[in-house]
Image: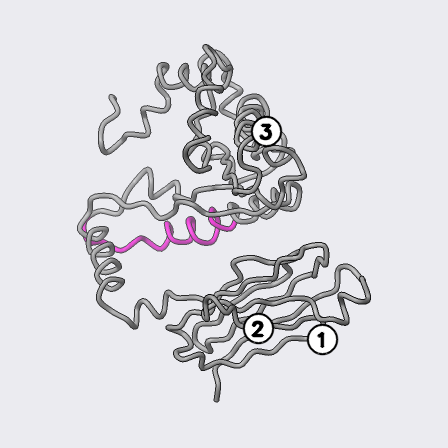
Amino acid sequence: MAPNGSNWFLGYITEACSHGFQYLYNNVGGAIETMSNFWRLVAYEIINEPWAGNYLKNPFLLLPGIAGTTNLQPFYERIAKAIRSVDDDTLIFYEPVTWGVRLNGKYFGTEFTHVPGGDNYRNRSVLSYHYYCIILSLESVPGNSTIPLFDRVLCDDIEESLLFRSVRHDLAQLSGSAFLTEFGGCDDSPTCDEQLDWGLSAADNDQETIKRLSRVYARAIAGKPSTMEFIPTDRYFYLSYFIDTNIKQPTEIFVSPLQYPKSSYNITVNNALKWRVDPTNRNIILVEPSDQIINSKVQDVLGVFSIHPKV
């Protein structure tokens, strides 16, 4: 079957595509240098949904761990080196093969051993990953039907659980952060169209829907995160993190004006923290170590911050 609009992914398994990816990973004709120069001009998700390489010559590349160690990690290292030569600050997103985030281990996980550029770049590296339920990708829901119970259990309770467990395992080893950069997927059925139309129309026209989607979150944390959550029904936000006094910039928390119009909130911090409103943006709360923590020079103290509506 030839790849077309509805089964474009079959293009990945063609010899031409696999051969082309392998040429890139092997730097044939200076391909990596050419790509490095390109990235000096744009931003930094290195490659979206990378293919394993020429599996026709080396079938073991279909094992995600082998693809990761043989092709992807060395490739990311060279690209990251070029990026960091001109930009040492911007986040770099790096991604395994799409089927490499269901399990872990030498053969079935990502098998990345460090973030691109090494451990010094943990705080500027993001493991990018996608989630499309395999059974729904193979057999879409027909017409206006709802997703069958068996498919929902398989997708939500089994496959999704495996995926997030796998990502947590990788982060425990690699450090850095992770970002679910694609999910959901949609076919051409009326059900899909209705869902998309509802979501987009609601986002465009319904302030209540926008409010439900709006969140309070920490956009920068001066330390190691422990817990962060926002409970929409209570409009309650909680953040705890281990303070790193070597970081001179404050923790930054975005407070949605849709959740708290006219700054209608109260803030509570423990003795390790102090806070103030950003004078340049009243929707940002700046949180810093208290004078007591700075003077004591004690590391890894847990700071606790919470925000809730005024009553």
Q: SS class of the residue under badge 3?
A: loop
Q: Which residue is mark 2?
A: 276
Q: Which residue is mark 1?
A: 271
Q: Earlier in the sequence, mark 2 or mark 3?
A: 3
Looking at the rendered image, the disc whose residue lies closer to the viewer, 1 or 2, is 2
- The secondary structure that dominates the magenta segment is helix
* Residue at image coords 24%, 21%: 2
Q: Are marks 2 and 3 in contact (CB under 8 Å)?
A: no
Give the CA distance from mark 1 to mark 3.
47 Å
User: For residue 248, which quarter of the picture?
Assistant: bottom right
Give the CA distance from mark 2 to mark 3.
49 Å
- Front-most of 225 and 146? 225
- Front-most of 35 and 182? 35
Task: Please report the bounds of the magenta region as a residue range.
Answer: 143-161
Query: Circle 2: is it few (<14), some (14-19), or many (20+) Cα within 10 Å?
Result: few
Q: Position of residue 195 (x, y in %)?
A: 24, 56
Which amino acid, mark 2?
Arg
* Residue at image coords 37%, 14%: 15
* Residue at image coords 30%, 53%: 147
Q: Which residue is mark 3?
A: 107
- Front-most of 32 and 206? 32
Seen in the picture, residue 72 relative to 234 is either above or below; the reply is above
Query: Circle 3: is it few (<14), some (14-19), or many (20+) Cα within 10 Å?
Result: some
Q: Are marks 1 and 2 in contact (CB under 8 Å)?
A: no
Q: Position of residue 37 (x, y in %)?
A: 45, 24
* Residue at image coords 56%, 42%: 89
Q: SS class of the residue under badge 2?
A: strand
Q: Is residue 74 magenta?
A: no
Which part of the image, by quadrant, shows the N terminus?
A: top left
Q: Are marks 1 and 3 in contact (CB under 8 Å)?
A: no
User: For residue 68, which quarter of the picture?
Assistant: top right
